[in-house]
Amino acid sequence: MALLEMHVTLEQVLIVGALLFAIGMYIALTKRNAVAVLMGIELMLNAVNLTFVAFSRFVESPRPLDGHVFAVFVITVAAAEAAVALALAVTIYRFRETIDVDRINLLRW
Amino acid sequence: MITVARNLLHAVLFLILSFVGIAGVYITLSADFVAVVQVLIYAGAIAVLMIFAVMLTPRSARDNAGNMLQGPSLALAGLLVAGITFVVLETDWREASRGPFDATAAEIGEALVSPFVLPFEIASVLLVVAMIGAIVLVRED
């Protein structure tokens, strides 16, 4: 791994994480297809993981690998969430013939 | 690229590309185990799930269109990036002087069984619940 070690700094990685989070939030807020909204959410989770790993690499700590463990947990929860949400999308499509979140208005009063 | 692609499937492919790119960033941060997990779970499993979901909803809109919130969300995203960048550059992070990690997989495994046993078990229960829930949701009848 030392061969691949480049000179990235903590600030650079954190700013990349912020950019990814903002792009994911923009996608999750603006897209009309439910699968596209999910893609935005996955991107946001990835950005958070990136900041976890970056802090774990650079910041002084008695147990520096805890950030990696958190990242693995976040990946696990993200996988579960993606499976359930995509199953929901398929179920809604079966009943409504659409997964356009602007047209799923069952709860409108 | 995910947000400007005209076709939803192309957007999914760009998402896979960004997952692989993030795995590369993990490798430069000497996080080898997390990088491998990222490629396996995100670029493998979640990407396949996304493509399945797109393919299983054939008559829905495929044009990756946006809704009315584009202006406010763009402003909100820009504000977020500006705020986080300011905080990142202004804070003293007490950076450690140690070098890159050697191999992280063994230490992550030990951490998962000694201080993080309870979250580990809860995560496995969560995965079982999610699996059963997904099967029940998409079952015919």
Image: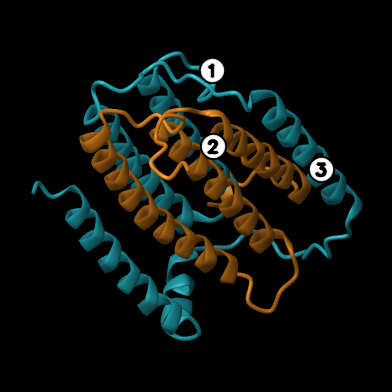
Farthest-out residue, bottom: B114
Q: Where is residue A7 in the image (x, y as percent from the top left)?
A: 71, 43
- Crowdedness of circle 1 by 10 Å Cα count: few (<14), some, many (20+)? few
Per the image, label 1 sits on a secondary structure element best described as: loop
Report how far apart the C-alphas of labels 2 and 1 lie in the structure: 13 Å
Circles 3 and 1 on the same chain: yes
Q: Position of residue A49 (x, y in %)?
A: 56, 54
Per the image, the residue denoted by label 3 is B85
Residue in view at x 74 percent, y 36 percent: B76
Scheme of image coloration: by chain
Per the image, the residue denoted by label 1 is B4
Pair 2/1: label in front: 2
Of the chain colours in the picture, the one used for chain A is orange
**Disc sitting over residue A16 in the figure:** none
Per the image, label 2 sits on a secondary structure element best described as: helix
**Disc sitting over residue A28 in the figure:** 2
Q: Position of residue B61 (x, y in %)?
A: 35, 20
Of the chain colours in the picture, the one used for chain B is cyan
Query: Is residue B136 left or right of A17 when viewed as pictured?
Result: left
